[in-house]
Amino acid sequence: MQDSYYFLLPLQKISFFILIMEDYIVSARKYRPMTFDSVVGQQALTTTLKNAVKSGKLAHAYLFCGPRGVGKTTCARIFAKAINCFNPAEDGEACNECESCVAFNEQRSYNIVELDAASNNSVENIKALIEQTRIPPQVGKYKVFIIDEVHMLSSNAFNAFLKTLEEPNPHVIFILATTEKQKILPTILSRCQIYDFERMGVQNIINHLKSICEKEGVAYEDAALELIAEKADGGMRDALSILDQAISFCQGNVTYDKVMEDLNVLDAENYFNFVELSLANKVGEVMILLNNIINNGFDGGRLVDGLASHCRNLLMAKDESTLPLLECSEKQRQHYKEQAQKCPVKFLYDALKLMNDCDINYRNSHNKRLLVELTLIQVAQITQEGEASFP
């Protein structure tokens, strides 16, 4: 009996940990928007969709396209719920109280069908979907079919789908979502209302991350959230995934240094230092800074890429009209603007040319470090008197 007890104890512990894991929900799912107004960074688009619901002027097919993680599938679900809502609000939002809304929120609605075209892209899958379009909705006015990653459908599947898309049953609405609109047949595109989703602005992502941290009781540094937002490259889902990772790594206190360590990101201050030293022609200090960075485990090629992006940002920061093109926080934008005033335009052009040549030759170079060193030496000598600048 005693042996049995010790045999069962590990299983009990395993069950306990499984229970904890099941209770945890990643931020991208936990804070997934449920209304149009809670969608971040797509105000013009969500206003148009709300107006369509409010006026009742609905097309039979919509195409939502844009980068990953910007809210295409989320908006498709919110729109599908609002279309079938019995008592929509005056602004076009779903009431979330009627039978149709409750059924959707509890994931038991038969009027809203989702198909992932990435794994269901054959003719048979589309024919099965077409068969479902013939069944009228059980509750509500419309049967809504959301086809995600629609560009993954095979050519035969697209052709099978075309006729149904052209002349659907009056109770059917299709919402197609894709990250690659150019792969969709023109005959499909011409039959859809097309909505282009924008990449999220850095400031929008930062504000959303702040609100989540406050709701979760997580301490944070503004600089850390700025770094996460920039790393996400315009995708809110990516930003939330990075935030979850950072919270785990930082144990509830998200600091700039810890996030840099977790993401293996080179501090942007290094790029500012490189430019300052190069303008002063301090070749020796440039080499010392490069050596420190490489000794800390960073690749020389990535350093040159980052420095090239930095010089491009400085070029944009020299003109007030192009300053908004910088995808960074307002504080970082001001930093770029201050350094840009010190940089001659010719210096930035020559530096970009040198680093672009380095990038082209880096992969085939037998001595990659030497190539990076020569490139940075040349950059540091661009403004040196009596030396010819490099074309």
Image: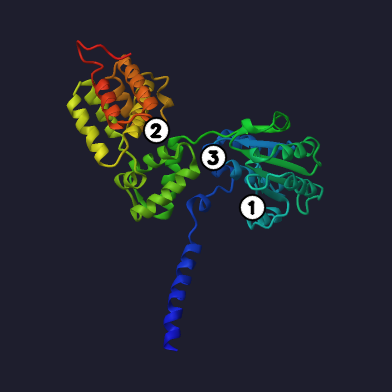
User: Is 342 left, or right, of 165 in this rendering?
Assistant: left
The three-letter code of the residue at mark 3 reads: Arg
Dividing the image into 4 quarters, which one contains the N terminus? Answer: bottom left
Q: Which residue in the protein does label 3 denote? A: 68
- Specify which label sits upstream in the sequence, 3 or 1: 3
Q: Which residue in the protein does label 1 denote? A: 96
Asked if residue 244 is positioned above or below residue 190 in the image, the reply reads below
Find the distance from the CA under tag 2 to the CA under tag 1: 37 Å
Give SS at disc 3.
loop
Which percent across, then down, holds residue 163?
80, 36
Density class for disc 2 (Cα within 10 Å; few <14, some 14-19, many ≥20) is many
Residue at position x 62%, y 41% from top? 149
The three-letter code of the residue at mark 2 reads: Cys
Q: Which residue in the protein does label 2 denote? A: 328
Density class for disc 1 (Cα within 10 Å; few <14, some 14-19, many ≥20) is many
User: Is 338 left, or right, of 152 in this rendering?
Assistant: left
Find the distance from the CA under tag 2 to the CA under tag 3: 19 Å
62 or 41, which is in the foreground? 62
Which percent across, then down, holds residue 115?
67, 48
